[in-house]
Image (cartoon, coloured by chain):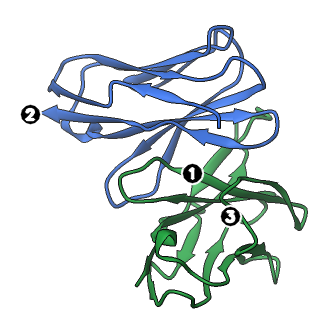
Amino acid sequence: EPEVTQTPSHQVTQMGQEVILRCVPISNHLYFYWYRQILGQKVEFLVSFYNNEISEKSEIFDDQFSVERPDGSNFTLKIRSTKLEDSAMYFCASLGTSGSGNSYNEQFFGPGTRLTVL
Amino acid sequence: ILNVEQSPQSLHVQEGDSTNFTCSFPSSNFYALHWYRWETAKSPEALFVMTLNGDEKKKGRISATLNTKEGYSYLYIKGSQPEDSATYLCAFWDTGNQFYFGTGTSLTVIP
């Protein structure tokens, strides 16, 4: 069964460093998402991406964050200058049909990348 | 900031008991409601995508209902099994293509 993959599974970085989190969505999916979950808090939407551009972003997704789909398969989240409060699990998701013909689609999540900022 | 609430926050039931929990969301700008099952150390697994008021979906012993006019959805588990132990998340998908997750209900089924 197709799945969303993410690398690395755990990233440790120093405050102020740039990190790139990588995701490989399910091929033929068209919408891609990044979420984060700070330990003990709810899952938060960061950004959605469609047709090679950002379609929606939350207040969290400020100028320190960027996303791109550099080669048609990878979907990356870059944090330019990490802060301690960026420590969280980052989940990528892609949106595709559930196979039932219903146009309201089902998200498939990756396993997440745990980012630790020291 | 849009609020999606789930209750209860946690639940312990005996094996074989049936249980249910609630997701409350805004009744405006509704596009879809998603239910996920999230086991520790795994990624959320989609259970249901619900779109129409009055929708009822079923997958094995798990079913869900949707009321978009009053802004709530119920998830039911019939005859709970230990393997049902997980966090159950709902996510409200608005017409602006944003997802808002609830806080989750943590279910523990005691053998």
Disc sitting over residue A26 in the figure: 3
Q: Quadrant of residue A27?
A: bottom right
Picture residue at 75% right of the left edge, 20% below the top? B28
In this orientation, does residue A98 appear?
no
The quarter in which the N terminus of chain A is drawn is bottom right
Most foreground residue, B30 or B20: B30
Amino acid, disc 1: Glu
Horizontal arrangement in the rendering, residue A76 relative to residue B83 (left or right): right
Q: Label 1 belongs to which residue?
A: A44
User: Which chain, by letter, is green?
Assistant: A
C-alpha gap between disc 3 and disc 2: 37 Å
Amino acid, disc 2: Pro
C-alpha gap between disc 1 and disc 2: 33 Å
Badge 3 element: loop
Subunit that carries the residue with mark 1: A
| Residue A101 in the image, given as x and y percentages of width and height | 77, 34
Label 1 neighbour load within 10 Å: few <14, some 14-19, many 20+ = some
Disc sitting over residue B111 in the figure: 2
Disc sitting over residue A35 in the figure: none
Q: Relative to B31, does residue A50 appear above or below in the rendering?
A: below
In this orientation, does residue A104 appear?
yes
C-alpha gap between disc 1 and disc 3: 21 Å
| Residue B38 in the image, given as x and y percentages of width and height | 40, 47
| Residue B53 in the image, given as x and y percentages of width and height | 69, 11
User: Which chain, by letter, is blue?
Assistant: B
Amino acid, disc 3: Ile
Most foreground residue, B19 or B95: B95
Picture residue at 50% right of the left edge, 20% below the top? B64
